[in-house]
Image (tube, rainbow, N blue to C red):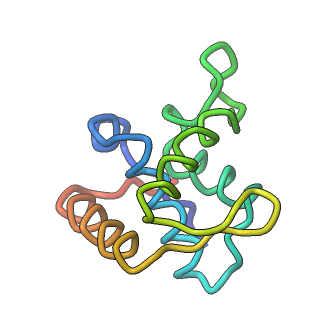
């Protein structure tokens, strides 16, 4: 199976909240449980520049998800927490699908 990542030019204009929604959606679509660890891996794999340490770009920085996840929960776009798992609410799923449409208009980069 090919690893999919997006070109930095495609995702750098998106907010971190939108990238996280995309990551949750991506995990759920694979019929997997969206744990915090899995979400860190998914977001870092898809969007490495947005979710890495600035001094160590080959390592994911979980702190970049902390505040945005709280914001997404407060806006009622997701449910769950880092100790259990995350899922999208109906509005969150709708927003994730809109984000996906914008990504589909650009090309994917396969590694």
In the current view of this chain or complex, which residue is farthest to the front?
Answer: 74
Residue at point 52% right, 43% down?
68
**Residue 111 in picture, x, y percent from top left:** 52, 53
Residue at point 21% right, 60% down?
102
**Residue 25 in picture, x, y percent from top left:** 48, 71
Closer to us: 62 or 10: 62
Is residue 96 placed above or below 58 in the rendered structure?
Answer: below
For residue 38, side relative to residue 19 (left or right): right
Closer to us: 106 or 35: 35
Residue at point 36% right, 43% down?
7
Quadrant of residue 83 within the rendered picture: bottom right
In the current view of this chain or complex, which residue is farthest to the bottom?
Answer: 31
**Residue 40 in picture, x, y percent from top left:** 67, 50
For residue 111, side relative to residue 77 (left or right): right
For residue 84, side relative to residue 21 (left or right): right
Closer to us: 3 or 39: 39
Residue at point 51% right, 70% down?
26
């Amino acid at each position: 199976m090919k690893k999919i990542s997006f070109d930095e030019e495609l995702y750098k204009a998106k907010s971190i909240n939108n990238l996280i929604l995309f990551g949750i959606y991506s995990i759920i679509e694979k019929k997997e449980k969206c744990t915090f660890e899995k979400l860190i891996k998914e977001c870092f794999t898809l969007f490495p520049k947005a979710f890495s340490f600035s001094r160590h770009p080959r390592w994911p920085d979980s702190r970049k998800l902390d505040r945005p996840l709280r914001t997404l929960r407060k806006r009622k776009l997701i449910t769950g927490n880092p100790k259990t798992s995350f899922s999208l609410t109906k509005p969150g799923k709708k927003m994730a699908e809109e984000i996906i449409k914008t990504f589909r208009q650009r090309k994917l980069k396969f590694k």
